[in-house]
């Protein structure tokens, strides 16, 4: 592959990755590290990859949202409702009716 095509595709992939990271950041209430502005394009690209790595690490360390166990532990949840919820999520019901 020609070097200019390779460079163009690399830049497009990086830009798409950063756009996807921005959407995920918004969805999970996180923020992307600010992009550092430098004149050298190779260094600028390196800083973007480093920022993306920091963001992905923070995303990995976030706690998941509400789990099925959280829902089933809700106070006042009837046995019938719990059974319906378990069935919806494909969980085996171990409760005796």
Image (tube, rainbow, N blue to C red):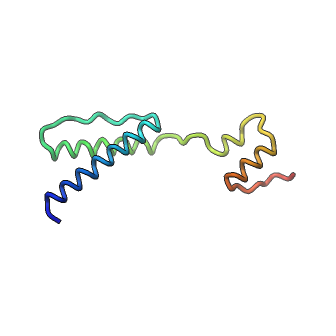
Farthest-out residue, right: 97
**69 relative to 77 in the view: left or right:** left
> Can you say whether 63 is above or below 3 in the image?
above
Residue visible at 19% across and 54% down in the picture: 8
The N terminus, quarter of image = bottom left
Q: Where's residue 61, x and y in %?
A: 46, 42
Residue situated in front as seen by the camera: 2 or 48: 2
Q: Where's residue 96, x and y in %?
A: 85, 53
**10 relative to 54 in the view: left or right:** left
Residue situated in front as seen by the camera: 9 or 29: 9
Residue visible at 35% across and 36% down in the picture: 32
Residue visible at 28% across and 44% down in the picture: 50
Farthest-out residue, bottom: 1
Q: Where's residue 29, x and y in %?
A: 45, 34
**32 relative to 40 in the view: left or right:** right
Residue visible at 72% across and 37% down in the picture: 74
**Quadrant in which residue 55 is drawn:** top left
Q: Where's residue 52, x and y in %?
A: 32, 44
**40 relative to 15 in the view: left or right:** left
Q: How many marks?
A: 0
Residue situated in front as seen by the camera: 42 or 3: 3
């Amino acid at each position: 592959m020609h070097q200019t095509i390779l460079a163009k595709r690399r830049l497009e992939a990086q830009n798409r990755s950063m756009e996807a990271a921005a959407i995920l950041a918004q969805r999970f209430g996180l923020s992307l590290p600010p992009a550092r502005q430098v004149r050298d394009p190779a260094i600028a690209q390196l800083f973007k990859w480093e920022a993306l790595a920091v963001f992905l690490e923070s995303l990995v360390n976030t706690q998941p949202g509400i789990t099925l166990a959280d829902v089933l532990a809700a106070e006042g949840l009837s046995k019938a409702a719990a059974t319906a919820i378990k069935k919806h999520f494909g969980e085996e019901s171990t409760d005796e009716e």
